[in-house]
Every structure is written in structure tokens, then in C-alpha cells.
Amino acid sequence: LIASASAFSANKLGATRVSKVSSLVGPAFAPTFRLANTQLEAARQEPHGGTLVNLMVETDEEKEAAIAKADIVLEATERQLCDVQLIMNGGFSPLTGFMEEAEYQSVVENMALPDGTVFGLPVIFDTDDEDLQPGQTVLLKQGDLPIATVEFTDKYIPNKPLECLKCYGTSAIEHPGALMVATQRGKYYMGGKVTGLNFPVRDFPCRTPAEVRESLPDDVDVVAFQCRNPVHRAHYELFTRALDDPLVGSDGVVLVHPTCGPTQADDIPGDVRFKTYEVLKEETANPRVKWEYLPYSMHMAGPREAIQHMIIRKNFGCTHFIIGRDMAGSKSSVTGEDFYGAYEAQDIAKDNSDKLGVTPVPSLNLVYTEEEGYVTADYAKDKDLSTKKLSGTKFRKMLRAGDDIPEWFAFKSVVEVLRENA
């Protein structure tokens, strides 16, 4: 089921044009690229590209001036809101706007910006609007809230099949990322400079990289754990035991950093996932585990997305990153087969670790045993221990039926939230 050229060029749901903005004469844009004026030295990790980007204007006057420069108002999609927020707050440093064609092509072909800086996936503004042109400035809104202006510098027709082949490893639309590119993204991509006005309103708090850096210890390793689903017992054991890995220094901490933006259609909604994290944070109260939330839209791009996650967590101050089996992987909607090998993400992370300045920490393959609780699968096999298993499908059936969920599998507080929001 390979995506045809027509599948990649049909009309899509892009940002919605709302209205024209009156042409107002106002002061020029305030400078929109500045070093985050917080204690960056408090975090030991250098931002990607050397400088933590902060594109937010600081005064009402600056906001009014930026809005007055806009020609058009657009209602942003959920994915665009995630991307623009990470551009504005420095999560995508060193980017200062949506990628122009040369940057897009370089990332697609080489997994790097034109200057050689590693970058996992393209960050673009998509549209079907024939009238949008370079030289125009648009105001992106979330409902009535002005979020950012984008000063467009170019417009191009992307090679979407090539983009999917390079970034997702396939152009088959049975891959959720390729399907998104083919059916949701607009015909055109546009590059341009972003000026941040307000952060989107969300059901979960999303602190900026600068704010998170200020909250992290400056003298120990910070190990990031990425997830997009509720955290169950095995996950918790995995990321807390990562602190004992020889690659991690003594007294290190874990930053659990779930993505709460759009993911796959059958995933648990972001607001419900957020509630499960909050109750678990309260239940465990572990001083070596920090919790923050990321407004990121998943691509399910496997190895390439692992690189993207490492870059983002580097900008948030993390020195290490846990790489699980088949991280950010996905299955064919036709055959059910995995698109990526179990260790492809770990391999690409190791290959690029030195360039990124982030140390990948392989996740342990843990199993639950009747005799000793959670141990590694190899240890359980060597000791001939009795293991217990509960599939995700079985867990969901038990959840819907109101059956008791074994506490070795899931935290009681998390189960309660999932049942309340079923």
C-alpha cells in the first residue's frame, strides 16, 4: 500500500484562514531572538547549537507592534501549535522559525541543518492556501488567543514521498506518520521567522526549557525519560533503575518528560494522560524523579524521532536519555508488522551521541517474577524464576470490565484515573 503521488497532493486540513488584519502602521518588531535571560549556567548541559533560543516578546507594546505587522490571521492546527510553541520557547533550539526549503531538504536528506547541526525531523509550516506568499506576515491564533506571528520568507512544494522514505523509513501510508504527511499536511510548506506572543492554553502545564533548567540540579547527571502513555510499574522500575546504570554519575536524577500533544488515534487523550502522571507523582513522591510536560506532536518515526527527542531534552537540560526497545515505533495498519527493528533507535542514538552531547542509556528488559519482583529477563531466565505477564490488550479489557488490576502491573492511583475517564 504505497502512497501514490496523488495521496501526497490532495487537499489537507491545514491552518484555517480567519480574516485579514487591517494594515496598521506601528513600531518595528522588537528583537525576537535573544538568549533566554535566566540562569542557564545553572544547568550543566549546553543547549543544542550553543544558545537557548527565546522568541517571546516581553511587553504589551511589543505584542501590539508584532500583531500590527500581520497581514492575515490564521487558526493554527494542534500540530502547528505544538511546533510553534517549541520554536518560541527554545525546545527546538537552534531553530528561530519554520524551516525554509534548504533547511527542510538538508534535514530530510542528511538529518542535519545546512551547517551540519544534527536535527532529526523537519519542522515546517504547511498550508493549502494559494494566496499565502513570502513577504507576508501571518498571525497564528488558538481561538481568540494570539500565539505568534510568522514572517514568511519562502514557499515550496515538498517532495512528500521522499520526506516519508527518509524520515519514517517508508512512504507507505499504512505508517501513521506517512499517513499524516499525506492526508493532513497541506500542499505547500513555508519557512519563516517566528515571534512569540502567548503560549497556547493547555490542560497540562508546559514549562519552558529555561524554567526547567532552573529547577534541575547543576552538579549531577539528568536522565530524560520520554513516554506517551500512562506510566505503569515496569516503566517506573525502568527509569528509576536507569540511575544505577554505569553511564550515569552518582546522585543523578530522572526527568520524566511525557509528550501530551497529538499522538496516534488510538492513544489515551493527553488530558487523561496528564492526570495519571499527576496522581503517580503524588503517590511515589520520589525526590530523584522530576516531572515536566512537553507540548510535542508525535510522528512515530522510530530512529529519527529518537534523535529529535534527544535534541529537545538536551535543550531542557538533560545529559542522558533513556532509549527503549523500538522507541517511537509503530506498526503497519495493514499487516500489524513493526516498521523498525527493536534496536534501531538505540543504534542511531549511539552513532550520534558525540555530536549531540547526550549519552543514550539503553532501557532494561524487565520482567515481573513471583520470587523476586522485577528483574531483568536474562536474570529471570538464568535463575529459572516464574514470570508473570499481562498484555496491553488484556489490561484494557480488564479495565473496561471493572476487574481487579494486579498491583505488580499498574499503580492503583493510575488505574482509578483511567477508569474515571474511560
Image (spheres, rainbow, N blue to C red):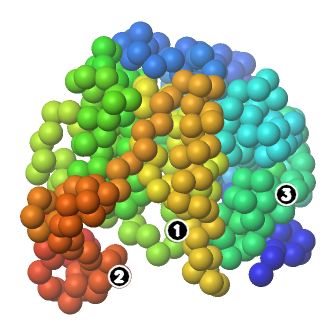
The residue tagged 2 is 393
Relative placement, left or right, of 275 versus 139 is left
- What residue is shown at x 60% (from left), y 16% (from top)? 50
Considering only order in the chain, which callout, 1 or 2, is on the residue closer to the N terminus? 1
Q: Give the quarter of the figure containing the N terminus.
A: bottom right
Relative placement, left or right, of 298 versus 172 is left
The residue tagged 1 is 264
Is there a contact, CB below 8 Å, between mark 1 and mark 3? no
Label 3, secondary structure: give it: helix
Residue 364 shows in the view = yes
Q: Amino acid at mark 1?
A: Gln
Which quadrant of the structure image shows residue 418?
Answer: bottom left
Considering only order in the chain, which callout, 2 or 3, is on the residue closer to the N terminus? 3
Indicate which disc residue 162 carries.
3
Considering only order in the chain, which callout, 3 or 1, is on the residue closer to the N terminus? 3
Disc number lying in front (1 or 3): 3
Residue 412 shows in the view = no
- What residue is shown at x 72% (from left), y 74% (from top)? 173
Which quadrant of the structure image shows residue 97?
Answer: top right
Which quadrant of the structure image shows residue 87?
Answer: top right
Q: Position of residue 156 (x, y in %)?
A: 90, 48
Label 2, secondary structure: give it: helix
Is there a contact, CB below 8 Å, between mark 2 and mark 1? no
Q: Amino acid at mark 2?
A: Thr
Gap in angstroms between the C-alphas marked 3 and 2:
35 Å
Q: Amino acid at mark 3?
A: Leu
